[in-house]
Amino acid sequence: MAKIKEKRKRKISVKIGGSFLAVVVAIELGLFISLYLLIVNTWVREEVDSVVAQGQNHALVLSGDFSAETIEHVVLMEEGSSQTAIVVQDPYGKTLKSSQIINSQMSKHISELRNETKSKTETLHYHWLGDKYIVSKSSIQKMGKF
């Protein structure tokens, strides 16, 4: 009789221990996933902000002097970078100069931004796992015109 009571106690303690372990693992898993997503989304937001700031800086330089030399200089600054590219277009959407060869995916992103408000700085980015590019548009203002 004593052996049966001992076996029941062990079974109950194993069940309680297993339940406790399962609850703790589930809580930790939920916290780790939440923390991971928070960190990744923060990092993506910082990258997007960096791309927008870089585009605004280039637009500011070109607003001061929109000459072939300045366009060449701005494009040259980005040519060495494997992670960023710049495309300078006229108000009609014709590409004046680009730091990389424009592929079909880049063209798709550029055309999506082309029809938007000209006076607005915009960011177009998709899911960070599925898309290759983060795109920003910064309008060049010359004598009050965009």
Image (cartoon, rainbow, N blue to C red):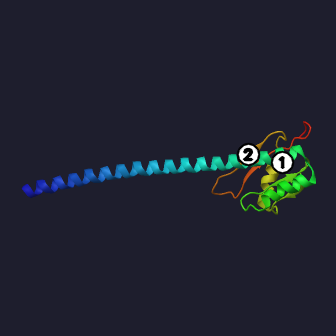
Task: Identify the residue at horizontal 40%, vertical 50% (top origin).
Answer: 26
**SS state under label 1:** helix
Residue, disc 2: 53
Mark 2: few/some/many CA within 10 Å (<14, 14-19, 20+)? some
Q: Quadrant of the N terminus?
A: bottom left
Residue 126 in percent (x, y) is at: 68, 51
Residue 114 has which mark? 1
Location of residue 2 by image quarter: bottom left
Under mark 1, the amino acid is: Arg
Lower position in the chain sequence, tag 1 or tag 2: 2
Percent position (x, y) of residue 19? 30, 51
* CB under 8 Å between discs 1 and 2: no
What residue occupies the far left of the structure in this picture? 1
Residue pictured at 69% horizontal, 46% vertical: 49
Which kind of residue does numbered mark 2 sit on? Ala
Q: Residue at x 87, y 41 (%)?
A: 141
Give percent across and percent down for residue 77. 80, 57
On screen, residue 69 above or below 63: below
Q: Marks 1 and 2, Cα distance to the nearest angstrom? A: 19 Å
Q: Secondary structure at mark 2?
A: helix
Q: Residues within 10 Å of mark 1 (few under 14, many from 20)?
A: some
